[in-house]
Amino acid sequence: MKIIIIPGDGIGPETMAVCTQILETVSDKLNLQLQLDHEIAGHVSLQKYHATVTPELLAKVKAADGLMLGPMATFDFKDESKGEINPSKYFRKQLDLFANIRPAKTFPNIPTRMNPFDLAVVRENTEGFYSDRNVESGNSEILVTPEVGIALRRITRLCCDRIAKSAFELAMTRKKHVSIVHKANVLRITDGMFMESCYNVAKNYPEVTVDEFIVDAMMAHVVRNPERFDTIVTTNMFGDILSDLTAELSGSLGLGGSLNAGDSYAMGQAAHGSAPDIAGKDIANPFSLITSASMLLNWLGQRHQLPLYIQAAKLIDQCMEQAIAAKETTQDIGGSLGTKQTGQRFIQRIKTA
Ligand code: ATP
């Protein structure tokens, strides 16, 4: 399997360096024969090619089996006519990676104010309130007059059906419970359609129990009792906000791994951004990217029936639990190591496992 590695901006290069070494180590240990091809996107690409992402890069990504995308300085990329394209949006849209799966769970040794929990947010990735991806050309956020702006939210039955199916499929591998998060009391047509899709899809999964929460109330429920949730399905913007909250509740945003999956392609990507405030200080937590890499290996293993890849994902997850138990982590989750040293210890752990 060939995986394209893109370090990204901010803390991307230092955390992706660790993640790449871990992929190489696990590949050597289990003879995965992973081929890791290094490419660039974001600020470095903008300087070199006058575009944050190029069509040539997309062609290389499409020809590979998977992609690891580092955090991107999305906020800096404002004008597409100047090559400032949001790489995250670009790949999600071009590769039709409609399901963004963002797990969040507590670990015994990480200080948190919550009861132990283990949940996953399944967030729609290709439409919703994201004005840069829900129209064929142009942008659905409009400045009507200097004092008036409009942003449009697109919801389609196809996208609702497929994200609901992803959530129920995932729930079947977990505790078989799906919570639907919406705002159908106000967004009656769009979230009404989303709810309808979820309940229709639910009929095909009689073993899965279902409940529903209005998004604002959900924030209170998830802070009060995160342990009551298993698989949460929601639309794009709600899922983005909710999953940052659940990652932070688990101990740190630095634990937030995620997978962007479509029918035939997947991209691992940390749930957080480029964290410019801590970039280059050797304190960023690489576990979010490492978890994302493990999710990508697992997805490749399932899709291509490669049991060794599934085993590799389990090995990474196991080593992460052990590293956390031994406090061989960065400071944000209670350890005292730098990013590099956290990686070195992790590699030793994989080698001796
Ligand atoms: P961007 O504009 O690229 O989204 P941001 O700083 O606004 O960047 P995040 O990157 O999501 O947003 O980060 C929010 C905060 O969470 C950061 O200021 C940082 O303190 C913390 N954080 C994010 N990722 C990590 C990480 N991997 N390790 C440790 N702390 C992190």
Image (tube, rainbow, N blue to C red):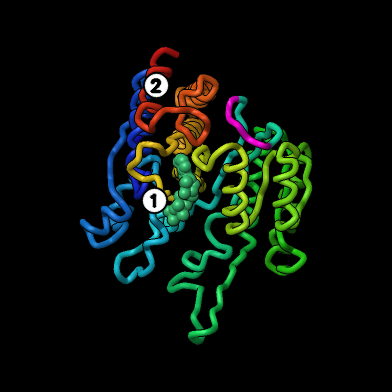
Task: Residue at 33% x, 43% y: name it.
Answer: 280
Task: Residue at 77% x, 47% y: name it.
Answer: 203
Q: Is residue 210 left or right of residue 46?
A: right
Residue sitting farthest toward the left: 48
Tell me if residue 111 is in the magenta stretch. Answer: yes
Q: Tell me the magenta residue range.
A: 109-113
Q: Quadrant of the C terminus?
A: top left
Mark 2 C-beta closer than 8 Å to ligand 1: no
**Sooner in the amino-acid sequence: mark 2 or mark 1:** 1
What label does residue 293 carry, if any?
A: none
Q: Principal SS element in the magenta part?
A: loop
Asked whether 238 or 180 is in front, the reply is 238
Task: Residue at 28% x, 39% y: name it.
Answer: 37
3 lies above or below 136: above
Q: Which residue is mark 2?
A: 345
x, y percent for residue 74: 41, 58
Residue 190 location, quadrant = bottom right
316 lies above or below 246: above
x, y percent for residue 248: 58, 43
Q: Amino acid at mark 1?
A: Pro
x, y percent for residue 106: 62, 32
Mark 1 C-beta closer than 8 Å to ligand 1: yes
Asked whether 232 or 159 is in front, the reply is 232
What label does residue 276 carry, if any?
A: 1
164 lies above or below 336: below
Between label 2 and label 1, give the one nearer the viewer. Answer: 1
Q: Is residue 88 left or right of residue 317?
A: left
Q: Amino acid at mark 2?
A: Arg
Q: Quadrant of the N terminus?
A: top left
Task: Residue at 36% x, 44% y: name it.
Answer: 12
Crowd around label 2: few <14 · some 14–19 · many ≥20 (10 Å):
some
Crowd around label 1: few <14 · some 14–19 · many ≥20 (10 Å):
few
